[in-house]
Image (cartoon, rainbow, N blue to C red):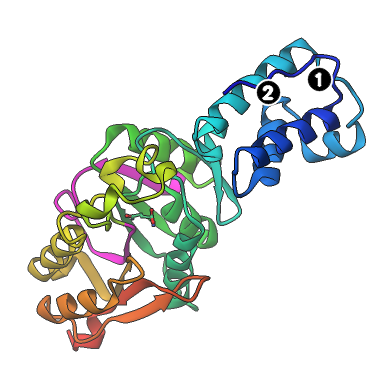
Amino acid sequence: MTLDFAPTLSREAALRSLARAFEAAGLPDARADARFLALHALALDPLDLSLRGNQTIGEDGARRLGRVAARRLAGEPVARILGEWEFWGLPFALSPETLVPRPDTESVVEAALGLFPGREHPLRLADLGTGSGCILVALLHERPDAFGLGLDRSAGALAVARNNAVANGVGARAAFLCGSWLDALKGPFDLIVSNPPYIAAPVIATLDPEVRLHDPRAALDGGVDGLDAYRAILSGLAQRPDLLAPGGALVLEIGYDQGEALSAFVQDAGFAEARIGRDLAGRDRVVTLTPSLAGR
Ligand code: GLN
């Protein structure tokens, strides 16, 4: 579906017409999507739009607006069209190799920050499957004397994460390494975090097309039961407990229905207990493991 904008349209009128088209197409967040995309296509900030909404969009504006409208109407998520998304109040560039950061994942950052309230010496962090780098960069942003290592199997994702660390002012305290889970790691770390792929492979076909068709499969697919990454991380840590410093912790994002399965694994891996944290919707979303709970 295409949408034509006359160059003589005002910015406000163009925005209204974009929102109406999105509403007519049944997009659930039609108005918000239209606003994000109009600001992007017309290279405006929100103040420009509200103070100078009656200026015309011009030839270039009309063309760019038509292009973003067509992409959105074809089902491409807003974040993919913008090429960046916000997480923890910070901007993150995206690429096809990175998941769009989810608000739920902020629960991982919160859980991690809550673990070391009055820490005296600098934290050493590792983020497994860092993707856009959003968890690591948010943590480094909150802990100005921490140092962090982001790992990913995708070289493309690592390049994006590195740029995001620099763009958000933490580049000097972040390093990035190509590797799978714990394999390339040399510890010890005070905190290991991860939002691994955890969707059961057969479930992927049932996901919303915006996720299924636009997020990288490698960031979603957790194997037959969705738990492969947790097995790899926990068995790796059971074999190499030295990767966590004394008093260190592991904080993992989980699917809303995986709390029980994770708790069982955790005992097998030699941890006494898993603490489950919730997301904003009140669903299980984070598991925190501290070896000290197992008396190690
Ligand atoms: N939370 C994501 C989703 O629901 C999945 C991300 C992941 O597997 N880590 O699509």
Q: Depth check: 186 or 2 in front?
A: 2
Q: What separation in Å lies between label 1 and label 2 (alpha carbons)?
A: 9 Å
Q: Is mark 1 within 8 Å of ligand 1?
A: no
Could you tell me if the residues under marks 1 and 2 are in contact, i.e. CB atoms within 8 Å? yes
- Residue under pointer 2: 65
Image location (x, y in percent) of residue 156: 33, 32
- Residue under pointer 1: 57
Provide the secondary structure element on which disc 1 rests: loop
Q: Is residue 86 magenta?
A: no
Quadrant occupied by the C terminus: bottom left
Pick out the residue farthest to the front. Answer: 24
Provide the secondary structure element on which disc 2 rests: helix
Q: Is residue 183 magenta?
A: yes
Q: Quadrant of ligand 1?
A: bottom left
Q: Is mark 2 within 8 Å of ligand 1?
A: no
The answer to whether 99 is drawn above or below residue 226 in the figure is: above
- Under mark 2, the amino acid is Leu
